[in-house]
Image (cartoon, rainbow, N blue to C red):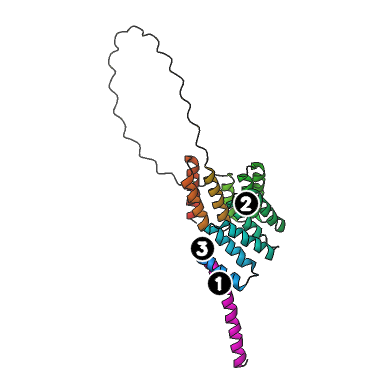
Amino acid sequence: MSRTAALVLAVMVLAGCGARRPFDQGVAYLRQGQYAQARAAFDEAIREAPGSAEAYTNRGITRVRLGDLDGALEDYTRAVELAPKDPDVPYNRGIAWIARRAYPQAVVDFTQALALDPRHTRARFARGTAHSLAGDLEAARRDWAQAIDEERDPRRKELMRIRAGLEPAPAPAPPPAPAPPPAAPPAPAPPPAPPPLAVPPPAPVPPPPVAAPPPAATSPASQELASRGLSKELAGDRAGALADLRAALAAETDPDRRRGIENLLRLLEAR
């Protein structure tokens, strides 16, 4: 190869790397939780490659993390136009609809993802979550059961089972039992019985006990945050899942549900 040809090839390679660099930087920032930097990198990637569905999808994910749900939905919609055969695009848009509490739209997008890939277990499970948040528990259980049955990843299957309520979150190990107290000395002999007394009149009947207050209802905000956190974990967003579950713990008032969220946080933080 001549020196001139080698230089031309080197320039082409460098140009190709330069065109790809903003997208790669955006992915790296996104994985590190640096969402503002990721957004800027994906902006540049889209300017350089306006037909990249990947760039729009990842900018949409970044916008969800930044709380810009309207912008995320716009990006996902553009990605659907550019990559109509990719089931992950409507799946991601469905997650954004859940964050917007637009559950019927989320169901439509998850159904579209399943039409493109019937074995997309994350989309099926997420559709069950959307049904649950919309109040259709029967449809939710059907989707959850099928997704769990078809899921092949053991860790993801375990998380799905916990979210569906089929098994409790793993509890922390109990503390060691305390040492038994020393044996008490023998009791002294009882004193002689006093002479019999006159029988007192019967005591008045005590009033009926006051009924205990009903258990605290689950906070809707806590339930939604916990559901969204598990959806993020299933989608591979560990940082986003932990943030949502910690917010759910702060919003939850019921002691039993707080313990469940705490146990789930321990499970994810230990991985």
Q: Which mark is residue 22?
A: 1
Q: Which residue is mark 3?
A: 35
Judge whether residue 15 is colored magenta: yes
For the N terminus, the image quarter is bottom right
Query: Residue at (60%, 78%) from the top-left corner?
Result: 16
Lateral position of residue 143 relative to residue 204, left or right: right
Question: Label 3 vs label 1: CA separation?
Answer: 14 Å
Q: Position of residue 252 (x, y in %)?
A: 49, 44
- Residue type, label 3: Tyr
Q: In front of the other: label 2 or label 1?
A: 1
Could you tell me what secondary structure mostly forms the magenta stretch? helix
Q: In front of the other: label 2 or label 3?
A: 3
**Vertical position of residue 126 compared to residue 81: above or below:** above
Element on which disc 2 rests? helix
- Residue type, label 2: Ala
> Which residue appears farthest toward the bottom when viewing the image?
2
Few, some or many residues within 10 Å of mark 2 (<14, 14–19, 20+): many
